[in-house]
Image (cartoon, grey):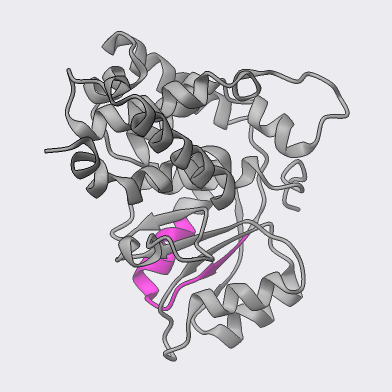
Amino acid sequence: MSIAQEIAPHLPYLRRFARTLTGSQQSGDSYVISTLEVLVADPSAFPKDSPSRIGLYRTFLDLWSSIPINGAVDTAEAAPAAQRNLNLLTPRSRQAFLLRTVEGFSGAEVAAILQVEPAQVDSLIDLAGREIALQVATDVLIIEDEPVIALDIESLVQDLGHQVIGIARTHKEAVKLAEAKRPGLVLADIQLADGSSGLDAVNEILTNYEVPVIFITAFPERLLTGERPEPAFLITKPLATEVVKAAISQALFFDKRSSRRAA
């Protein structure tokens, strides 16, 4: 089996990881394309001592880590908020945290991808947890039509120190709440109670002002097709606490306004 055939099933999920790591579809996809170009130019660069999924992520992060800006720490007080927030997490701890929580790798698999000792993985994830605690709180709008799931998300969001300003079940409710409350983060289901689309509701909200958005769906592969636009932040039902936590922290890293706490 060729390398292309081996890694093809894993590419949609690498793209998700790349976007979460970089904070945008364009940047994340560019790194994935660069990774594929490396493998085409030099197939021997692909690790032969690991399963294909681990080898793919390892190759990607080798490339990502080789670019100095991705590991740089800008301590200038005038640095943009997104850069300041990114600096709260060291690159290795952020990678370990996302690999474990978002991508679902085991501790041993994370160690293989990052090429560190297994004992270091727990330390890196613990460090990420402490660093994430430095993140500011914000006001959150939940767009979800299933009451039980909405309440679960609300509880989780509040446990993380954020304030829920409302739960919308339809496109119309979502837009109305967003206009009235101006949340600092939106968590949106794709399919809503009245048959409307959470994607459409978010697009209308974004015409009025910028806000980080995390989409929630039971079928992530439907949104990772390579067609544009696609969400940078995507979590899958059934929801896992650590995955939601990771997505929220990453989304806020890249928010220009995330240095402002909720009232």
State how many labels appear.
Answer: 0
Q: In percent of the image, x 45 and y 73: which residue is there?
A: 144
Residue 160 visible? The answer is: no
Residue 167's spot in the image, x, y percent?
Answer: 54, 73
Rendering coords of residue 66 (x, y %): 53, 18
User: Residue visible at 25% across and 47% down?
Assistant: 8
Dividing the image into 4 quarters, which one contains the N terminus? top left
Q: Does residue 56 lie above or below 214 as drawn?
A: above
Residue drawn at (34%, 67%) of the image: 222
- Residue placed farthest to the right in the image? 78
Relative horizontal placement of residue 66, taking residue 8 as reference (left or right):
right
Q: Is residue 41 left or right of residue 112?
A: right
- Answer whether residue 205 is visible to the viewer in this image: yes
Q: Please state the horizontal and vertical placement of residue 165, each as a whole percent of the image.
A: 64, 66
Decide which of 20, 148 is in the foreground and name it.
20
Outermost residue on the left side: it is 1
Q: Is residue 246 magenta?
A: no
Left or right: where 127 falls relative to 210: left
Q: Residue at x 41, y 86 (%)?
A: 193
- When asked about the image quadrant of residue 118, the answer is top left
Q: Which residues are magenta?
A: 140-155
- Closer to the camera in the image, 30 or 167: 30
Furthest residue toward front: 41
119 relative to 206, above or below? above
Task: Where is residue 50? Give x, y as percent.
Answer: 18, 23
